[in-house]
Amino acid sequence: MSTTLTPIPTPIPTPAPALGMTAVTAAATAPDAPARAAGTAWHDVCALADLEPLWGEAARVAGRQVALYRVDAETVLAADHRDPRTGACVMARGILGSRGPAVTVASPLHKEVYDLATGRCLTGDGPALPVHPVEVRDGRVHIGLPG
């Protein structure tokens, strides 16, 4: 069985914030930036420079395994590292791509494709991939997890 992959456009389109997901760059953290969601605990995870562009990295944050994806110079997206179909912690090793304006990740196990803005499975009726808000402030990546 062979799989044909579509090359990632350069640069990857930056997704518009959607339900359950906010990608905020340093320029958007001014005092007029939208208020943070109530009940969200924010965690300083790493330096932006620690993340390779167009590559996923796994991190353990407040006891939870998350996958971080740096999609351009200042945008980082985050989701659970646990594959929602199999339960294996592999999503940081997924294949980044896009479908229209949506930035996506394909599970490295069964190739289900997930929208990183909404977590919705785009290849069927599979379970959603939990996604998390991210802020980049002063060169540091902060992730919001349920408090």
Image (spheres, rainbow, N blue to C red):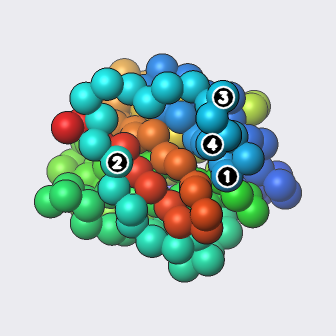
Mark 4: amino acid: Thr
C-alpha separation, residue under disc 2 versus residue under disc 3: 19 Å
Q: Which residue is mark 1?
A: 26
The x, y position of residue 125, in whole percent, is 36, 22
Secondary structure at numbered mark 4: loop
- Rendered location of residue 67, percent (x, y): 40, 59
User: How many neighbours does mark 2 have within 10 angstroms: few (below 14), some (14-19), or many (20 or more)?
Assistant: some
Which residue, given by chain and number where applicable, does mark 2 sit on? 42
Q: Residue at x 40, y 39 (%)?
A: 131
Q: Which residue shows up at 75% across the image and 62% down it?
A: 73
Q: Quadrant of residue 44?
A: bottom left
Q: Earlier in the sequence, mark 4 or mark 2?
A: 4
Kindly check if marks 4 and 2 are in contact, taking CB atoms under 8 A apart as contact.
Answer: no
Q: Secondary structure at mark 1?
A: helix
Q: Which residue is mark 4?
A: 29
Q: Position of residue 40 (x, y in %)?
A: 30, 35
The label number, if any, that marks residue 32 in the structure image: 3
| Vertical position of residue 38 compared to residue 70: above or below | above
**Residue depicted at 26% across the width and 53% down the height:** 82
Task: Give the mark nearest the N terminus, 2 or 1.
Answer: 1
Q: Residues within 10 Å of mark 4 (few under 14, many from 20)?
A: some
Residue 110 visible in the picture: no
Front residue of 142/97: it is: 142
Disc 2 versus disc 1: distance between alpha carbons? 15 Å
Task: Judge left or right: residue 86 versus residue 113.
Answer: left
Is residue 145 toward the left or the right of residue 136 in the image? left
